[in-house]
Structures are given as structure tokens and as C-alpha cells.
Amino acid sequence: MEEGDLAAGKSTAAERGAWVVFEDEAGQSITPPRARTWGRIGQTPVVRVRGRGSGRVSMAGMACYKPGERSRLIYAFREYRGRRGEPKGFGRREFRDLIVRARIQLGGPIVLVRDNVRLHLTAGVRAFIAANAEWLTVFQLPTCAPDLSPREGVWSLVKRDIGDLAAADLGQITRAVKRKLKTLQYRPEVIDGCLAGTSTAR
């Protein structure tokens, strides 16, 4: 989605009385990330991790905006524990269900702004979009354009708070992610700030 496409998306939303919805996915592993910290001279700080097993929490979220309305955050997540045959992330059905849930909660048409990950380009997703064209319009972001999506700001807030968590198991990561996302749902001014920090709002 280039600058002209962004303007077209906003115009489409205004004409249809639609919500502009930015969708994106992210993940958080049970393995804590490497980070810098302070320590005494000559003494390397050591953080002991008591986590067991492996796994990952996949998150899909939508930052939703409409003039005159409180900004919304709609999300879903799933755990991946490495079991045989277990999906590693979101599939076409989960993505479809999230869009339908957004429409129900927002109570109106949606202009969906998304990236071009493989899931979004599958025939099943394209068929779903075509079948619901009366309330769903989709605009595609260009490759590697995090500055255009407020979802990146939301994920940054989530990961900042749980980045130092030395989790004992995957469930602890899931609970921390859920708690932070739920908190953000009740802070529309923060969701507004994530949009203001992108080139989309300029």
C-alpha cells in the first residue's frame, strides 16, 4: 500500500462509514531474548532461567479506528507446544473468524489493512474476501513496511513488558500476553498513540 493507496483506503472508509482495521501477527517464545544490563566491573550478570520445555505464543491482532468512535483492539492468540501435527500459528479459519468477530464487535463495514504474508494470499482467504465484499474491503501493505502499521507499536508495548520475564512454562507467557493485551483494550488513548506514531497518520 503506497501513499496513494493509503489515501484511497481512508476515502473508502469515509464513504462507507467503515472502520479502518490494521491487522498483523506476532509471536513470543518461551526462551527469553538476550539483553544488555548493568553489572559490577568484572562481574558478568547471570540470569537463571527455570523454564521447562519449549513453545511459542502466536498473537493476531487488529487495531481499529473510526472518526468519532473509541479506538478498539481486537485480538486472538494460540499456543504452540511442539506436538506432532500441531499448527505453529494461525490458519485460514482462525484468520477468517477474527475478521468476522471484528465485524460483529465493531458493528459496521471494515476496511482491512494487512501485510502480504503467505496466509493472506491463499485462495481460501481471497475467496472469503470476495464473498463478503459488501462489508469487507482489503488494502495490502508493501513488503517490509512496519512504519505504516500501528500494530507494530502494539506488539512493541506487549513485548516490552514481557521481555524480561523468565517464564517457568509456556502458560506463564500466555497469561502475561493476555493480561497486557486486555489492559491495552481499556486504553484507547494508547491505541491512538500507536497510529499517531506511524507514517500512515502523517
Image (cartoon, helix red, strand yellow):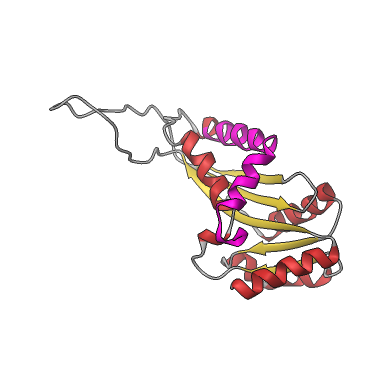
On whether residue 194 falls in the magenta region, the answer is yes
Rendered-image quadrant of the C terminus? bottom right
**Camera-nearest residue between 28 and 154:** 154
Percent x, y for residue 45? Answer: 24, 28
Looking at the image, can residue 98 be seen? yes
Percent x, y for residue 99? Answer: 75, 56
When the figure is inspected, residue 109 is found, relative to residue 101, above or below; the finding is: below
Percent x, y for residue 116? Answer: 58, 68
State whether the magenta stretch is mostly helix, strand or loop: helix
- At horizontal 65% and vertical 73% (from top left) the residue drawn is 5
- At horizontal 71% and vertical 57% (from top left) the residue drawn is 21
Looking at the image, can residue 88 be seen? no
- At horizontal 69% and vertical 73% (from top left) the residue drawn is 123
On whether residue 125 falls in the magenta region, the answer is no
Could you say which quadrant of the image residue 52 lies in?
Answer: top left
When the figure is inspected, residue 130 is found, relative to residue 86, above or below; the finding is: below
Q: In the displayed orientation, state which residue is furthest to the left.
A: 42
- At horizontal 58% and vertical 31% (from top left) the residue drawn is 175
Could you say which quadrant of the image residue 133 lies in?
Answer: bottom right
Q: Which residues are magenta?
A: 173-202
Could you say which quadrant of the image residue 183 lies in?
Answer: top right
Percent x, y for residue 95? Answer: 69, 57
Rendered-image quadrant of the N terminus? bottom right
In-image side of 62 versus 135 (left or right): left
**Camera-nearest residue between 155 and 82:** 155
**Camera-nearest residue between 174 and 110:** 110
**Camera-nearest residue between 187 and 79:** 187
